[in-house]
C-alpha cells in the first residue's frame, strides 16, 4: 500500500509541474531537430550516404552488389556456395532473392538519406554557395541510386521527399521513363553546382565531371544519342583533365587510387573496425571483402566466382602490334601461361574447380601471399583497392557509341583508337560502317570492363542478351527467359509490405 501511495504522489507532483518543465530534450538522443547544427553534421550525413555504396550486403560496390552487377553476364559465373547468388547467376532467382532485395533496400536507404540532407540543410545555417554545393552532392548521390534501381528493376517508386506520415511510406511504382527522368534531373542539377575537382581529404567525393559522366551515360542508355554526345564531349576538354592511365592495370591497385582516369570512385580502406560485415557501427571497417570472396581457396579465399571461357577466348581474338596477348588480359585474368605467378605462387599451385581456364586477377591483392592479410597487415580479409565506378575509358567508349549511332563514324574513331592504343593494338581499319564500328565498340567494352559490372547491362541495352548468353559457356544460360530476366522482380518483401506495390508483369 505504501508503494502505491508513493507512485500516486509522484504522479500528482508531476501533474503540478509546468508544461515547459516537462518538455526537456534528452541529451543522449539525436533527433532531426538537434542534429543539423553546422557543416560538420552535413558532412557526416553525406558520409553516411556515400558509405552505403560499399555496404557488404546491399551496396552496389560492396561484396554482394559487385556479385549482383557482374553475376548475370556471359563472362561471369558464381558457384553454388551461397544459393541466392548462384540463383541470380543462373537465372533461377525468385522475387525473394536476398542479393536483389538488399540492393533495392540499400538504394532507397541512400535516397532517404539524400532527401534528408536536402530538407534539413538550411538548419545548419551555411553560406548560400556552400549550401548549394552540398545539395548538389546529395542530388548526385540520389541520382546514382535511381540509376542503379532503374537499370536493375525497371519501374520503381520515386521518392524525392522524406515521408512524414505512415501513408507516405506506401507509394506505387513509376514507369522506368519517369525514373530515368528523375535521375537525369538530379545529375543535371548536381553538375551545375558541384566543383570541377577535389583535393586532399575530399578526393573521392562527387565532382562536376562525375555528374556529367553519369548524365551522359544515362542518355546512352536511353538512346538519346545527340544529348549523350553533347554531354560526354564536355569531359574531353578544359576545364576537365581526365586521361587514360598509360598502364591499364593502374586502375585496379591501391597505389594508384583516384588517378587521372577516375571520374567517380568508391573509396575503400583497411581502417576503422576489423569487421566488414558488422553493419554501420564502430566495428565496421571502411574496406570490403570482395577480393577475398573472389580469391582461390589456396590463398585463404572463398573462390566464389570465375570468368567464363568466352571471356578468356575473346581476349585472344586480336594480338598486339608486337604479336603478344592483349595486356588487359594479363591485368584481368590469371591462367596457365609461362612463369605465371599468383599470390607469390606458381599457377600449378591452384586448382580450377569450375572447369573454366582462368581466374580473376583484376581488383585482387595478388602481390600479397594471400587475402587473409588486409593491406594494413590485419587478418581481417579487407581490401583497400577502390572500386572504380566510372572511368574515363567508359566516357570515351560511350561517346564513340553515341557518335557511331548517329552515323558519325569518322568522329568516333579517335575515341575507340585511344582505347586500342593503350592496349597496344594496331590502328583501326579505316572506313568501317556503323555496324562494323559498333561491333568493335562492343568487343572493346567486353575486354575493357570485365569484372566491372558493365557487361550484362551493355547486352541489355543493346538487345543482345539472348544472343550472347546463348553463345556463352556460362552455366545456367538455358534458364534465361528473354524479357523476364532482363530485370529483377520487385522484391517480395516490398510486395508484402506495400499495399500499392505490384509485381513486374513477367514475374507475376
Image: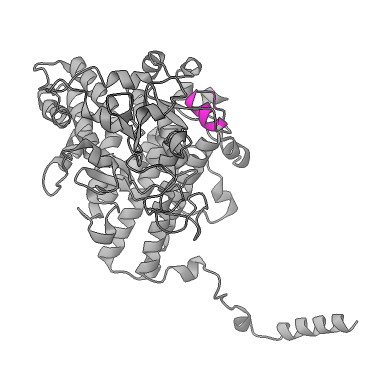
Observer-nearest residue: 82 or 208? 82
Span colored in magenta = 83-93
- The image position of residue 109, as x and y in percent, is 48, 49
Tell me if residue 423 comes above or below residue 196 in the rendering. above
Q: Quadrant of the C terminus?
A: top right
Observer-nearest residue: 392 or 221? 392
Q: Is residue 190 left or right of residue 88?
A: left
Residue 364 makes an appearance in the image: yes
**Is 92 in the magenta?**
yes
Q: Residue at x 43, y 50 (%)?
A: 52
Question: Which secondary structure type mostly characterizes the magenta part of the structure?
Answer: helix
Residue 155 makes an appearance in the image: no
Q: Quadrant of residue 137?
A: bottom left
- The image position of residue 243, as x and y in percent, is 15, 41
**Is 319 in the magenta?**
no
Observer-nearest residue: 171 or 253? 253
The furthest residue to the right = 1
Q: Quadrant of the N terminus?
A: bottom right
Q: Residue at x 56, y 30 (%)?
A: 83
Amino acid at each position: 500500500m505504501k508503494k502505491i501511495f508513493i507512485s500516486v504522489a509522484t504522479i500528482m507532483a508531476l501533474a503540478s509541474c509546468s508544461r515547459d518543465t516537462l518538455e526537456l530534450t534528452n541529451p543522449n538522443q539525436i533527433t532531426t531537430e538537434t542534429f543539423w547544427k553546422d557543416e560538420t553534421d552535413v558532412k557526416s550525413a553525406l558520409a553516411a550516404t556515400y558509405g552505403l555504396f560499399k555496404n557488404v550486403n546491399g551496396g552496389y560496390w560492396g561484396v554482394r552488389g559487385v556479385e549482383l552487377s557482374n553475376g548475370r553476364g556471359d563472362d561471369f559465373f558464381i558457384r553454388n556456395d551461397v544459393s541466392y547468388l548462384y540463383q541470380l547467376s543462373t537465372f533461377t532467382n525468385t522475387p525473394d532473392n536476398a542479393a536483389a532485395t538488399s540492393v533495392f533496400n540499400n538504394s532507397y536507404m541512400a535516397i532517404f538519406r539524400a532527401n534528408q540532407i536536402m530538407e534539413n540543410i538550411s538548419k545548419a545555417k551555411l553560406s548560400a554557395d556552400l549550401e548549394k554545393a552540398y545539395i548538389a552532392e546529395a542530388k548526385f548521390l540520389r541520382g546514382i541510386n535511381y540509376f542503379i534501381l532503374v537499370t536493375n528493376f525497371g519501374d520503381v517508386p520515386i521518392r524525392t521527399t522524406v515521408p512524414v506520415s505512415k501513408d507516405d511510406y506506401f507509394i506505387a511504382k513509376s514507369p522506368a521513363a519517369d525514373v530515368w527522368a528523375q535521375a537525369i534531373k538530379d545529375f543535371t542539377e548536381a553538375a551545375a553546382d558541384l566543383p570541377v575537382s577535389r583535393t586532399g581529404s575530399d578526393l573521392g567525393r562527387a565532382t562536376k565531371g562525375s555528374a556529367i559522366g553519369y548524365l551522359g551515360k544515362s542518355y546512352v542508355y536511353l538512346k538519346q544519342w545527340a544529348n549523350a554526345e553533347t554531354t560526354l564531349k564536355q569531359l574531353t576538354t578544359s576545364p576537365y583533365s581526365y586521361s587514360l592511365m598509360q598502364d591499364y592495370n593502374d586502375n585496379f591497385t591501391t597505389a594508384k587510387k583516384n588517378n587521372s582516369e577516375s571520374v567517380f570512385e568508391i573509396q575503400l580502406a583497411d581502417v576503422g573496425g576489423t569487421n566488414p560485415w558488422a553493419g554501420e557501427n564502430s566495428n565496421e571497417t571502411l574496406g570490403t571483402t570482395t577480393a577475398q570472396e573472389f580469391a582461390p581457396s589456396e590463398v585463404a579465399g572463398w573462390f566464389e566466382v570465375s570468368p567464363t571461357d568466352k571471356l578468356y577466348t575473346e581476349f585472344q581474338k586480336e594480338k598486339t602490334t608486337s604479336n603478344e596477348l592483349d595486356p588487359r588480359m594479363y591485368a584481368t585474368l590469371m591462367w596457365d601461361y609461362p612463369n605465371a605467378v599468383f599470390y607469390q605462387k606458381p599457377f600449378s599451385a591452384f586448382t580450377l574447380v569450375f572447369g573454366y581456364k582462368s581466374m580473376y586477377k583484376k581488383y585482387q591483392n595478388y602481390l600479397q601471399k594471400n587475402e587473409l592479410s588486409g593491406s594494413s597487415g590485419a587478418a581481417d580479409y579487407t581490401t583497400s583497392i577502390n572500386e572504380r565506378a566510372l572511368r574515363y575509358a567508359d566516357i570515351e567508349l560511350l561517346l564513340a557509341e553515341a557518335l557511331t549511332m548517329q552515323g558519325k563514324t569518322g568522329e568516333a574513331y579517335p575515341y575507340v583508337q585511344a582505347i586500342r592504343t593503350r592496349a597496344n593494338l594496331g590502328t583501326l581499319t579505316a572506313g568501317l560502317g556503323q555496324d562494323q564500328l559498333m561491333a568493335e565498340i562492343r568487343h572493346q567494352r567486353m575486354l575493357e570492363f570485365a569484372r566491372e559490372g558493365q557487361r550484362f547491362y551493355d547486352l541489355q541495352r543493346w538487345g543482345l542478351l539472348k544472343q550472347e548468353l546463348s553463345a556463352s559457356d556460362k552455366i545456367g544460360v538455358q534458364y534465361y527467359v528473354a524479357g523476364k530476366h532482363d530485370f529483377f522482380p520487385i522484391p517480395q518483401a516490398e510486395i508484402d509490405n506495400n499495399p500499392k506495390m505490384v509485381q513486374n508483369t513477367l514475374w507475376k
